[in-house]
Image: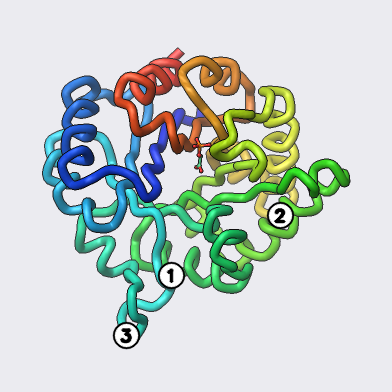
């Protein structure tokens, strides 16, 4: 039985004060909730103040990005060692806003994934196709390439530190979510791919989240799908009531 996982990706939003307030609202409402795994990923500058707020709760702290090197002359970058030092448990790797928006290559994403896991972080690895790729019938080809270019870099035991997030690019921030059936189709295919490459035990235990315009109105129907093990939430994670309603939907 895979435990449901709800992660909030705050992207480049909040101020120090609103980040703290949002985290406080979540802690007050779900501080010791254990039926669902919950993580929030604030912007880098707010990791430490948010960690303070989360310290007595079971909400985990995550970062939105990481550099593959542990230290060095990489202006503006943040290493996996630093993220651990700041109390991060999770990190998002391969988000389309970095793959497509900032030109991150498959190779760079693979290096980030490997470095993050080697330094003890849990990784949310994002995959997903664009609208034109879907319209051209290439969804599974794109998803397969993203999986093949990243996961085989890990040893079997390292894969236990990875959660996948299927995030169709056309659904991110658009208000147009994939239907539960569209998402389930890809999730089931990904699980079968995992089984073929890493064995049925891993395929049965590795969690696959859905992301892309998830909100309190559509979360329950997405989470009811057999291969959807949680959600990665952007916009709706910035409002405590919305995010809490999504967590509630994951409990059912
Ligand atoms: P959204 O973003 O929920 O705002 O669509 C999801 C994501 O980018 O992870």
Residue 136 relative to residue 193: left or right: right
Give me the residue at 46% from left, 18% from top. Answer: 216
Disc number lying in front (1 or 2): 1
**Of callouts 3 and 2, the N-terminal one:** 3
Residue 205 in sight here: no
Q: Nearer the viewer, residue 205 or 40?
A: 40
**Which residue: 50% across, 31% down?**
230
Mark 1 Cα-neighbour bin, 10 Å: few <14, some 14–19, many ≥20: many
Q: Nearer the viewer, residue 90 or 117?
A: 90
Q: Is the C-beta separation of discs 1 and 3 under 8 Å? A: no
Using the image as rendered, state which of residue 203 and residue 124 is in the foreground.
Answer: 124
In this view, the residue farthest toward the right is 136
Q: Which residue is mark 1?
A: 115
Residue at point 17% right, 53% down?
48
N-term-proximal mark, 1 vs 3: 3
Q: How many marks on residues?
A: 3
Q: Distance of mark 3 from mark 2, alpha carbons? A: 35 Å
Height in image: 24 above or below 120? above
Furthest residue toward top: 252
Identify residue for label 3.
72
Assess disc 2: are there few (<14), some (14-19) or many (≥20) residues with their C-alpha within 10 Å of its C-alpha: some
Q: Which mark is residue 197?
A: 2
Spatial CA distance of label 1 from label 3 is: 14 Å
Image x and y of residue 53, in percent? 13, 39
**Residue 17 percent coordinates (x, y):** 15, 41
Estimate the x, y position of residue 142 in percent, counting from the top left: 76, 54
Q: Residue furthest bottom?
A: 73
Observer able to see residue 18: yes
Residue 233: where, in percent of width, then height? 46, 35
First in sequence, mark 1 or 2: give its number: 1
Q: Is residue 71 left or right of residue 51?
A: right
């Amino acid at each position: 039985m895979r435990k449901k996982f709800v992660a909030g990706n705050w992207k480049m939003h909040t101020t120090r004060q609103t980040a703290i307030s949002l985290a406080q609202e979540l802690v007050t409402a779900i501080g010791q909730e254990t039926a669902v795994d919950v993580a929030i990923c604030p912007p880098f500058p707010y990791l430490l103040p948010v960690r303070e707020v989360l310290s007595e709760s079971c909400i985990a702290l995550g970062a939105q990005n990481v550099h593959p090197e542990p230290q060095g002359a990489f202006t503006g970058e943040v290493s996996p060692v630093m993220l651990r030092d700041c109390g991060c448990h999770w990190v998002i790797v391969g988000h389309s806003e970095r793959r497509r928006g900032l030109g991150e290559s498959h190779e760079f994403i693979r290096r980030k994934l490997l470095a993050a896991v080697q330094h003890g972080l849990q990784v949310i690895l994002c995959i997903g196709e664009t609208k034109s790729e879907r319209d051209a019938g290439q969804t599974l080809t794109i998803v397969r390439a993203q999986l093949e270019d990243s996961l085989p870099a890990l040893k079997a035991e390292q894969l236990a530190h990875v959660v996948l997030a299927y995030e169709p690019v056309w659904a991110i921030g658009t208000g147009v979510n994939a239907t539960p059936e569209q998402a389930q189709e890809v999730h089931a295919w990904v699980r079968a791919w995992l089984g073929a490459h890493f064995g049925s035990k891993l395929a049965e235990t590795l969690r696959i989240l859905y992301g892309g315009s998830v909100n309190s109105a559509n979360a329950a129907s997405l989470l009811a799908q057999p291969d959807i093990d949680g959600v990665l939430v952007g916009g709706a994670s910035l409002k405590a009531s919305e995010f809490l309603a999504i967590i509630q939907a994951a409990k059912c």
